[in-house]
Amino acid sequence: IVTWNFEREYRDRVLKYLFREYGAGRTPNPDVMCNKEIKFSVFLRRAKAMGIPRIATGHYARIRRSADGVSRLLKANDATKDQSYFLAALNQRQLAAVSFPVGGMTKKEVRALARRIGLPNAERPDSQGICFVGPVTMKAFLKTRIKPKPGDIVTTKGVLIGRHDGVHYYTIGQRRGINLGGGPALYVIGKDMRRNRLIVGTKNQLELFTNTVKLGSWHWVASPHKFPLRCTAKIRYRQRDERVIIRRTDKNGIVAHFSRRQRAVAPGQTFAAYQGSELIGSATIVE
């Protein structure tokens, strides 16, 4: 067995990005960045340098290769385990050199095969936590690099109801960690970075929902499509696909209009667009 250490690259390309984004009040996706910059970049290049033309990973996703050389990223057959969302930032060069052998199998089938051939991890629980970091809460991990900065917790009307230890430790829609005691459960609705205030409200408060999502630079996974684009999309992992129209604005920005209101849209997260089972494009949520 040959092992390669990419700790430095992971620190420089993933962890620094994670701390920078949280420090700016956004909610990054380290799993998407890890796949783009580590597993299917530095690791893939090292493999090719060793004369290995293609790598295989255990991601639950599929690739359909066409006669014209295009590699299309598809959802896994097991919808409950599909991980195509985390691969949304991959490009054609990367997809052409990878295989996902378990993408056409269910988790139950994978475990049965692992037991049959005697793999030691056949009964290992599914991994949780931050990619390559392990089972630690995000807040505890952030505190190793981002110092607490106490401030006010307010309602959407500006009423002071408590104190927080740092707005950068929270994400839109979060409930856990808002320890005010008594009354209804409260959720993060917004973050006022300038005033260092955490804005909270109830689970179904109007301000927590929107039909419109502003996006950053657009990435096509395979063939480009024309805007406006009617398709489905998701704004977080395990969310069901929602119907959406994606348009370019007059200022060359990109806006997605969902047919149903979306709850807790978090800037910094990945927006993934699908046509049927194919993941066709992605962008980072701006607002």
Image (tube, grey):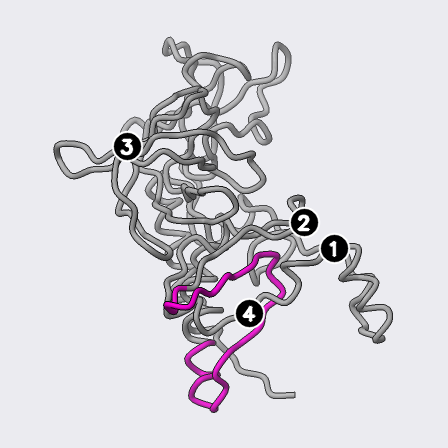
In the figure, is residue 36 to the left or right of 138? left
> Which residue position is annotated with label 3?
255
Disc marking residue 78: 2
Q: Nearer the viewer, mark 3 or mark 4?
A: 4
Helix, strand or loop for disc 3 = strand
Disc marking residue 6: none
Q: CB of mark 1 within 8 Å of CB of mark 3?
A: no
Residue 189, compared with residue 286, is above or below; it is: above
Disc marking residue 107: 1
Could you tell which of marks 3 and 4 lies nearer the N-terminus? 4
Residue 11, compared with residue 143, is above or below; it is: below
For mark 4, does the 10 Å Cα neighbourhood hold few (<14), some (14 to 19), or many (20 or more) residues?
some
Helix, strand or loop for disc 2 = loop
Could you tell which of marks 1 and 3 lies nearer the N-terminus? 1
- What is the C-alpha distance between the residues marked 3 and 4? 33 Å
Task: Say which residue appears at 43% left-offset and 71% top-offset.
Answer: 96
> Which residue position is annotated with label 4?
99
In the picture, the quarter occupied by the N terminus is bottom right
